[in-house]
Image (tube, grey):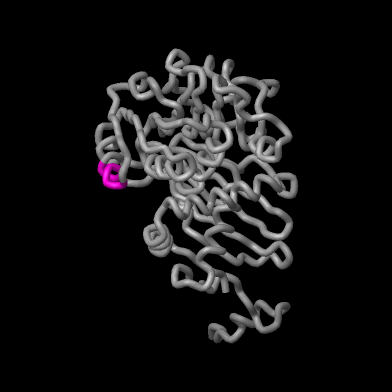
Amino acid sequence: MTRLVDVHNMARWISDNGPERCIAGMIEYIDADFRRWESFDKSARVASHTPFGVIELMPTSDHETYAFKYVNGHPSNPLRGYQTVTAFGVLADVHNGYPTFLAEMTLLTALRTAATSALVARVLARPDSKVMAMIGTGSQAEFQALAFRQALGIQTLRVYDVDPDAIAKFVRNLKPLGFSIEVAADVSEAVRGADIVTTCTADKQLATVLHDADVTAGMHLNAIGGDCPGKTELDPAILDRSKVFVEYTPQTLIEGEIQHQGEDFPVTELWEVLLGRKAGRTSADDITLFDSVGFAIEDFSALRYLRDDVAGTNYESEIDLVAAPDDPKDLFGMVGSFSPVG
């Protein structure tokens, strides 16, 4: 039998434990797995792009456990009554190839993206950071805010979105949780005086959401919206004066803010900083930029954390996913009792 966490139980697990507790545990699992980066198989995700959006598979393995996530990204979906992103994921035993754990990952990906952002900021942002500007208040925004409060103590948020309804939703969800939220008239107003800037917009285009003139010394930029070819959020001039950090360079060159910078553009991978092989922030005036596109090891970590946390609880169930004939060589025997026609 394969263990399953479905949508209902995923939502119940997050609600019962609280998103911040789930994010906190996930941060530690992602940290631990990135510190053993060299033990994983790594590849850029397999993507099928259409005019409607993208469908991707994100695989990895540490040679004991194999994982993959199925995920889509369709920016126009909300106008048609669908979510922009949906996902599910699988863990499998490398030794026999059997899937052992299956989970909803639309909610789980929101947690893991927020957890990764917070882990990186914990390493790269100024320790005295107090204010975060959030450009884009869509489905990911609340999770990001909770992650940064959990990891860095950020309580003050300055937000802007082109959609007033999205801002209202964000304020409605987070105001009761104790955040101080200032709604800005535009991006420049939101960013002014911020220590950390998170950009998370959905349009699939080469956009300039954040301009170079709005970025000041000492900021940490958490750019998580530019996550596919042809989609960016930052003025390219920002990259030229920032220290840029990525998950997996070959994938970020395809999908991230650096996609037009060329292979020689200097970047540092997160795992190198975590292991002390390369420097992160070296002064209070550094502009640090996390060019995040999401990577399979983060999904591996999220699934592993969820699997361990729900083991033996009523948040999981079992599904009969793998055929198991009495004789492993007699698959036909499972259906051979049918009555022939005539």
**Residue 100 in the image: above or below residue 207:** below
Q: Residue 175 appears in which quarter of the rendering?
A: top left
Which is nearer the eye, 319 or 283?
283
**Residue 54 in the image: above or below residue 19:** above
Residue at 57% x, 21% y: name it: 286
Which is nearer the eye, 151 or 106?
151
Q: Is residue 189 left or right of residue 149?
A: left
Residue at 56% x, 64% y: name it: 308
Extent of the magenta region: 172-177
Q: Is residue 284 left or right of residue 159?
A: right
Query: Where's the N terminus, which quadrant?
Result: bottom right
Instruction: Give the main secondary structure, helix, strand or loop, of the magenta stretch.
Output: helix
On the question of residue 293 being in view, the answer is no
Query: Where's the C terminus, which quadrant?
Result: bottom right
Residue 301: give x, y in percent of width and height: 59, 52
Q: Residue 132 appears in which quarter of the rendering?
A: top left
Residue at the front extreme, as displayed: 128
Residue 202: give x, y in percent of width and height: 41, 34
